[in-house]
């Protein structure tokens, strides 16, 4: 198979499947590893595929998320998966931790699962703060503008307050996860708060169910690989993401225990 034909076939495969690994391309096209990797570099440079560690994803695979939904509109979506993610994440909190918890329905499941009351918690979510207080947790709430739709504090004042703190561990929600664009959210003010929080945290975790993969929202708040992802399971067509960053799959862990 000549080079041009092989590269065209690679683009077809990536667009058909959403993502393919180097080994899959080698098997399907009978090409060597070095040839496939060289082709992927050329195709990525031409904007025809997104090259990721171990394979490639389609430039058309990501769904654009333009706006947030209300908390009430999201709370029942993928509820079982979110509870499993939250339960796993809660076990990571230690007595001497200073914990940041972002807003959202998945991080709400984390708050509901928390049993460690000796740690100190800061959240920019009003509902999360109320739940933490009800558990007897030492809880801090920053100032700032209250976003009505999601009931979180956002904006310049909130970001400035967060710059003063250095968290040992933190948990964030996200509207989209993509290897190229990273973790994304629809609003600038909320993205600024998320970004500062991540920059000032030692152990970082993004909590998201598998439906968030290959979705892109309007503003990137952190690059892919800057935080460990805790999810229910990685979609089959997204296996190439494994080499791009640290991913904990709660569903697979439960299945193996």
Image (cartoon, rainbow, N blue to C red):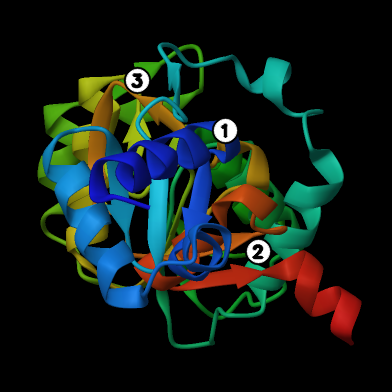
Q: Which of 153 and 256 lies nearest the eye of the viewer?
A: 256
Q: Residue at x 44, y 11 (%)?
A: 67
Across and down, in percent, residue 112 comes to 74, 54
Of marks 1 and 2, which one's residue comes earlier in the chain?
1
Question: Residue under circle 2?
Answer: 136
User: How many angstroms separate mark 1 from mark 3 (CA)?
Assistant: 28 Å
Nearer to me, 208 or 108: 208
**What residue is rendered at 62% in x and 74% in y?**
117
Quarter of the image for residue 190 reads top left
In the image, taking residue 236 as reference, residue 18 lies left or right, namely: left
Crowding near the residue tagged with mark 2, few <14, some 14–19, many ≥20 C-alpha atoms within 10 Å:
few
- Name the residue at 89% across, 75% down: 255
The Cα atoms of the two marked residues, 1 and 2, are separated by 51 Å
The answer to whether residue 40 is left or right of residue 54 is left
Q: CA distance from mark 2 to mark 3?
A: 33 Å
Figure check: 206 above or below 11: below
Among numbered discs 1 and 3, the one appearing first in the sequence: 1
Q: Is residue 170 visible?
A: yes
Q: Residues within 10 Å of mark 3 (few under 14, many from 20)?
A: many
The residue tagged with tag 2: helix, strand or loop? loop
Q: Residue at x 59, y 72 (%)?
A: 248
Task: Between label 1 and label 3, give the one nearer the viewer.
Answer: 1
Q: Which residue is denoted by mark 3 in the rendering?
A: 186
Q: Secondary structure at mark 1?
A: helix
Residue that numbered label 1 is attached to: 16
Report the quarter where the C terminus lies: bottom right
First-in-chain label (2 vs 3): 2
| Residue 120: percent from left, percent from top | 44, 71
* Residue 11 location (% of width, % of height): 39, 37
């Amino acid at each position: 198979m000549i080079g041009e034909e092989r590269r065209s076939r690679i683009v077809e495969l990536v667009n058909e499947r959403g993502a393919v690994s180097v080994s899959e391309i080698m098997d399907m096209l009978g090409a060597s590893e070095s040839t496939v990797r060289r082709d992927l570099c050329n195709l990525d440079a031409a904007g025809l595929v997104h090259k990721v560690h171990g394979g490639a994803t389609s430039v058309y695979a990501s769904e654009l998320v333009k706006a947030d939904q209300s908390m009430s509109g999201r709370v029942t979506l993928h509820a079982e998966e979110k509870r499993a993610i939250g339960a796993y994440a809660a076990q990571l909190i230690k007595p001497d931790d200073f914990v940041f918890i972002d807003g959202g329905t998945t991080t709400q499941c984390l708050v509901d699962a928390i049993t460690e009351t000796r740690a100190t918690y800061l959240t920019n979510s009003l509902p999360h703060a109320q739940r933490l207080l009800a558990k007897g947790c030492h809880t801090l709430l920053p100032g700032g503008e209250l976003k009505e739709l999601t009931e979180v504090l956002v904006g310049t004042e909130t970001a400035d307050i967060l710059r003063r703190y250095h968290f040992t561990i933190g948990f964030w929600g996200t509207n989209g996860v993509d290897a190229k664009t990273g973790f994304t959210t629809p609003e600038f003010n909320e993205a600024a708060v998320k970004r500062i929080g991540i920059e000032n945290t030692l152990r970082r975790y993004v909590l998201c169910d598998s439906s968030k993969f290959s979705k892109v929202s309007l503003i990137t708040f952190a690059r892919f690989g800057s935080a460990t992802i805790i999810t229910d399971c990685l979609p089959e067509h997204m296996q190439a993401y494994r080499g791009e960053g640290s991913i904990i799959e709660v569903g697979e862990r439960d299945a193996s225990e």
